């Protein structure tokens, strides 16, 4: 499919990095920040472009939603490098976890219960959240008290390593609980 964006935007595909520079700035007036970080004032776009040329740098729109938009006179490649560095640093400090799901039945056998409990403890040990889904089939809906006892037993058995993130909740024919590691 034909890409109608200007060539500048085609090079850098990430939406977060789509920054307007130089002639791609569409605002009539911009608030200009100089290369050393000082406020130069509000200028028409053409005058701001000329000021950037005087410094042999680029005019980069850093806050397009402000009124008027804020543009900095900086070297664009250095700006892009700094932005990518900040993104990598933010990703590194994000808490990575996955949501694992364990399906249970109100008619679960004691050995099956122990096996599922071991899986739950293993997931919680790896710092993943665990969603317990108790599925009801047919007339099992009449025996929600049995299901609640099984869920309470799981919560009690994992209380040393987990806390209840979301309390038991009925969604259709399933009872859901989310456990989070301590």
Image: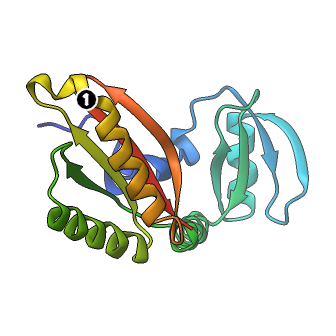
Q: Give the residue drawn at x 30%, y 67%.
A: 117
**From the viewer's perspective, is 40 left or right of 12?**
right
Q: Give the residue drawn at x 37%, y 39%.
A: 148
Q: Which one is in front, 153 or 4? A: 153
Quarter-of-image position of residue 121: bottom left
**From the viewer's perspective, is 159 left or right of 46?**
left
Q: Position of residue 8 (x, y in %)?
A: 39, 50
**From the viewer's perspective, is 174 left or right of 66?**
left
Q: Secondary structure at mark 1?
A: helix
Q: Which one is in front, 104 or 69? A: 104
Q: Which one is in front, 91 or 13? A: 91
Position of residue 61 relative to residue 35, above or below, is above
Q: Quadrant of the C terminus?
A: bottom right
Tell me if I can see residue 13 in this picture: no
Tell me if I can see residue 66 in this picture: yes
Q: Which residue is mark 1?
A: 143
Position of residue 96 relative to residue 48, above or below, is below
Q: How is the image coloured?
A: rainbow
Q: Give the residue drawn at x 19%, y 62%.
A: 110
Q: Position of residue 42 (x, y in %)?
A: 84, 35
Position of residue 47 relative to residue 124, above or below, is above
Q: Position of residue 158 (x, y in %)?
A: 45, 66
Q: Give the residue drawn at x 47%, y 60%.
A: 156
Position of residue 53 relative to residue 176, above or below, is below
Q: Quadrant of the N terminus?
A: top left
Quarter-of-image position of residue 31: top right
Q: Residues within 10 Å of mark 1 (few under 14, many from 20)?
A: few
Q: Position of residue 65 (x, y in %)?
A: 66, 31
């Amino acid at each position: 499919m034909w890409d109608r964006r200007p060539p500048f935007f085609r090079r850098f595909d990430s939406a977060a990095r789509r920054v307007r520079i130089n002639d791609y700035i569409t605002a009539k007036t911009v608030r200009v920040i100089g290369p050393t970080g000082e406020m130069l004032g509000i200028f028409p776009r053409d005058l701001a472009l000329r000021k950037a040329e005087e410094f042999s740098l680029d005019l980069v729109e850093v806050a397009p939603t402000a009124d008027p938009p804020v543009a900095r006179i900086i070297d664009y490649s250095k700006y892009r490098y700094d932005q990518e560095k900040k993104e990598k640093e933010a990703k590194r400090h994000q808490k990575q976890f996955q949501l694992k799901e364990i399906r249970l039945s109100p008619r679960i056998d004691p050995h099956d219960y122990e096996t599922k409990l071991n899986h739950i403890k293993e997931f919680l040990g790896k710092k993943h959240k665990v969603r317990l889904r108790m599925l009801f089939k047919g007339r099992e809906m009449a025996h929600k008290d049995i299901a609640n006892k099984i869920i309470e037993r799981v919560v009690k058995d994992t209380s040393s390593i987990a806390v209840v993130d979301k309390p038991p909740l009925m969604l259709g024919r399933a009872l859901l609980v989310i456990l989070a590691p301590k």
